Each structure stands twice: as structure tokens, then as C-alpha cells.
Amino acid sequence: MTDASGLHRALVAPIESTAIDRVEGPLLFVTDTRGVGWDEYVEIVLANGERRHGVVIDIDRDLAIIEVFEGTAGFGIHGNAVAFTGTPLQIPVNEQWMGRIVNGRGSPIDGGPAIVGSKRRSVAGAAINPAHREVPRDPVLTGVSAIDGLATLVRGQKLPVFSVGGLPHLELAIEIAAQATVEGAEFRVVFAGMGITNADADLVRDGLEERLGAGHAVLLLNTADDPTIERILTPRLALTIAEHLAFDLGHHVLVVLTDMTSYCDAVRQLSAARGEVPSRRGYPGYLFSDLAGIYERCGRLKHRGGSITELPILTMPAGDITHPVPDLTGYITEGQIVLSVDLHARGVSPPIDPLASLSRLMRRGAGPGRTRDDHLAISAQVLALLARARQAEELAALIGLDALSITEQRYLEFARRFEKDFLDQDPSQARSLGDTLDRAWQVAAIVPARELTMVTTAQIDEHLPTTTSPVGSAGGRPPT
């Protein structure tokens, strides 16, 4: 049986009750509910025939507390029927989701028909047996040089983006979702927005219009004025769709989750509504396992062709990387992409800080047989040069630019050109991996060749011209 929202009731005899005790805000208190469990999906039929939906957020003996998705406006305590389905929310799983825009609980908001189907799956998900996991490998190319060249995203990896309010993290997420590709395989994008503004929702729609039109993406948009409980369901709904696409249909899927800080704040609000004892900064003590339940649903399975790659986006309050959300995320995930306030102030787009960013699985997605033979070497070399350039900048601030050696001045010129020619790029123009690595060699050529200690002589001879050029020129191999 399917309701107007396209959501399916479990094929079990529901527990029904009309004993509504009281209504408080979005919460409905129902008595005479023995046998009902947490996270159970609920259908509510009002006296006028209107249908609403909710989730059980707490149980106290025979009292169930329900958060209603559509709110409780116009809700009385008499004449309403509450049906507990016996399971968490379930959704149909098929390719009807592709090309669609839905809200945080899966109801279409694009004017199209409801998504239906006989095969359904609980959004609660299930843990992947570690014995059936396959190690992530092979690159996902995003078209962003700072990621593809220096912190390569790998199929099956979870790689978060750490940002601060005011930085263009949503624009970066849209750019990656619109441009990301995998070589020689089908690719799909599931984009989940949680607690975003209506203006940001429009930005996401516009940015992914081409991919939506091709039927290669689905958008789940939970805006800031939508119910809190819907925000908690949104990433689970997105991952349930992705699991079907990846493990049943064999597609490679990128799941973008933004903003995980809004999600965690919703978890904190729900915990407070349940009356649970708060832990660190008011978040519940189970926040770590809750986040792990989301992040660990990505990966690859043995004997299956598909994969799920996660790109969670989170904002760090006041830029505090020790805040519980980035701190716990860092424990679970395999690296991070960090956005820099200073780079953003200097007009660099995207403002990715290469020295603070890391992909721990990069060696499984880059190098010989996967990208280009010189990829890992030139990546390590550029990062080493950038670290030396930072030291030269600090020294120049102490003793003055004129007191620096010629080599140190070359490092300063390298840092300037690195930002201008490598980091900074037009968001609408995806760079090929070949272009990215060639740019890395061009900026590395600014320092003397004797400083290039992490690449081989053969690689230098192959990728750098033999002519010399002065500091600040367009290219050329510097003298030793």
C-alpha cells in the first residue's frame, strides 16, 4: 500500500490508537501504545481525513512521543487515529529516484509523481560485514586541482570537507557533484542538503541541473524551516538510495552530505526532547556511534561492481577543529579537505589549504596504473616546497624580504604562483588530471632543480624544459 507521499507501510499489522494525551509544538503524546518502539514510522489520520506522518522519538511505558513531519497546526486531541507501522521508515528502491528533487523524507517537491515500487528498504540501514568489504581503490576525479592533484578522492572513501561559516563550501560541494567522474564506469550522484536556506536550495538545483536532466543525480533538500526529525532522516534516506544504486545496480555513487553540523545540531535537539543527559557541549554521548552509522555505510563490497563514496561537508563553529562534530568526524573518516579563511580573503577559489588537507587513501587511488606515473611524486614534491615556502614567509616577516637568499626568494615566488596558477580556478571549468599535474610541474620549476628532491632526474627531464628562465616568468626549468 502506498500513500500520497510515495512512502510504504510495512506489511505488518499496525498498532492503532486514538488515545492522544496532548500536543506540544511538533510533538504528539499518545497513550495505550504497548509494543511500540523507538524510530517507528507513524501514519496519522486527522478527523477531516488529512494524512500526516511522524516518527516515534521516545517511549515511556505505554506513552509514545511522536514528532510529526508536517507539524501539528490544526491538530486536536479528539477524532484522530494514529497507526504505528511496526518498522522504521521504508522507501521504495529503484531508479525512479534519478533526476528527481525530493524533500528530506522522500516526498517529491519537483512537481513530479510520487516514487513507487514493490521493492522497499528501511532507511535505518544495516552495517556492512567487514569480511565482505573491499579496500577502496581507483580515483574519483572532481575537476578540482587541489583535490585531484594533492588529496585524491578514492572510490569507496569517506573524505569530509572542513569549513567555516561564510566560506564557499556549498559552492565547492556543488562543483564536485556536477563535475565528478570515474573512468570507464557508470556514475551517479546523491546530494543531500540538511538545514540549508531556500536560497541555497535554489543554488543546488541550478548547479546540478545538467546532471539531473541526464537522470544521473537525485537531490534531497531539507531546508532550515523543515522539521528537525526530517533532518535526521535525510542522510539515511540518501544512503539507502545510494546502496541500491551501488550494490544492487552496480553504479559508482558519490553521496554529498551538507551540512553535517546542522545534522548533529538536530540530533542534539532530539536528544534534549527525549530528556537524555547531555555530554560534551550538549551533544548526546552516542554522537560518535550515530555519525559512524552514517559514514560507515560507504565503501565497496567484494564481488559487487559498484561503490559508495561519501563527501560530508561540515562547518566548524568559530573555526574550532576540536569542536565535537569535526573532532568525531576526523576519527571516523579517512582524511579531510580544509578550507582556509586566509586564502578566501586573498580571492583564491576554492580556498583549500593543501598543508592542512589529507587523503589517507590517496596511494590506493593515484600513481602508476591508476592516474599518472609521476602523480604521487610531484604531489609530495609540491607539498614539501609549499612547507618550505611557509617557512620563508615567516622568515621574511622577521628579517625583511631583502635579507632573504635567492633560493628563499624563489620559494616565495613559488608560493605566489602556486596560489595563482594551481589552486585558483574557475568553478565552471573542470580541469583534467593531466592539466592539474602539468601545472604542478610548472610551479615546481620556479625553485632551483637541486631543491626538487622528491622526484627523479628522469621525471625532471621529462616534465621540465631544459631552458632556464628568470623568477616570475611563465615557465622554464630554473638553473641549478
Image (spheres, rainbow, N blue to C red):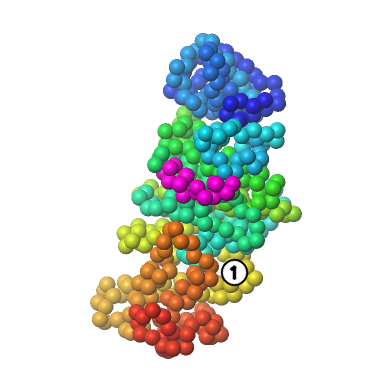
**Does the stretch in magenta take in 473?**
no
Name the residue at 57% across, 13% down. 18
Q: Secondary structure at mark 1?
A: loop
- In the figure, is residue 478 to the left or right of 300? left
Q: Main secondary structure of the magenta part?
A: helix
- In the figure, is residue 475 to the left or right of 290? left
Whole-percent x and y of residue 3?
A: 61, 25
Name the residue at 49% across, 69% down. 436
Specify the quadrant that holds the N terminus: top right
Whole-percent x and y of residue 226?
A: 45, 33
* Residue found at the far top of this picture: 78
Q: Toward the viewer: 393 or 475?
A: 475
- In the figure, is residue 313 to the left or right of 404? right
> Which stretch appears magenta?
200-215
Name the residue at 54% across, 75% down. 377
Whole-percent x and y of residue 419?
A: 38, 68
Whole-percent x and y of residue 251?
A: 66, 51
- In the figure, is residue 53 to the left or right of 223? right
